[in-house]
Image (spheres, rainbow, N blue to C red):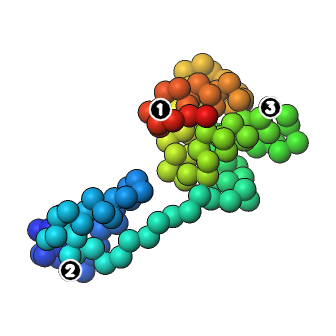
Amino acid sequence: MRAMYDERKDWGVVLVGMPGIEKRLARYPQLYSRVGFAHEYRSIGKEEMLFILEHHWNKLGLELDKNNFSDTEAIAAVARITNGNFRLIHRLFSQIKRIIKVNNLTSISKEVVEAARDCLVIGNIQ
């Protein structure tokens, strides 16, 4: 990365990582001196999450119905598992897509979300 930075100053690199990545990068002064700024993203809110989930449902050819009990349970499961972590939502939906395809399902249920969670390595789960 250092060589790319030194040779081409007309573009940048965005590093996205876990909390504390800035301190870990600071151990490498030649690399860290090229970091323009660090930004810590907050968890997404309820409205943002619903917007994102609706998008993911649509990408799977499904329609999210907030009045449907099964969809509401699935939304709650996603919110509980991801705690508003955008990256984790994306990873979870990669597994949901796979589970739906393999099992030839036509909806996302709480059980599908939990099965998708079991396929991920995400640390402590409540």
Judge from the rendering whether residue 41 lies leftward or rightward of residue 47; answer left or right: left
Viewer-nearest of labels 1 and 2? Answer: 1
Q: CA distance from mark 1 to mark 2?
A: 37 Å
Disc 1 target residue: 120
Kindly indicate whether the residue at mark 3 contacts the one at mark 1 (C-beta within 8 angstroms): no
Q: For the residue labelled by badge 3, is the local secondary structure a helix, a strand or a loop?
A: helix
Which numbered disc, 1 or 2, marks the residue that appears first in the sequence? 2
List x then y, in percent, for residue 81.
61, 39
Q: Give the residue type at disc 1.
A: Leu
Graded by Cα atoms within 10 Å as few (under 14), some (14 to 19) or many (20 or more), the crowding at tag 2 reads: few
Judge from the rendering whether residue 90 lies leftward or rightward of residue 52; answer left or right: left
Residue 61, by quadrant, is top right
> Which image quarter holds the N terminus?
bottom left
Graded by Cα atoms within 10 Å as few (under 14), some (14 to 19) or many (20 or more), the crowding at tag 1 reads: few
Q: CA distance from mark 1 to mark 3?
A: 22 Å
Q: Residue at x 70, y 49 (%)?
A: 54
Q: For the residue labelled by badge 1, is the local secondary structure a helix, a strand or a loop?
A: loop
Q: Nearer the viewer, residue 22 or 8?
A: 22
Q: Residue furthest right?
A: 67
Q: Residue furthest top?
A: 103
Q: Give the residue type at disc 2.
A: Lys
Q: CA distance from mark 2 to mark 3?
A: 51 Å
Disc 2 target residue: 9
> Which image quarter holds the C terminus?
top right
Q: Residue furthest bottom?
A: 10
Q: Give the residue type at disc 3.
A: Ser
Disc 3 target residue: 70
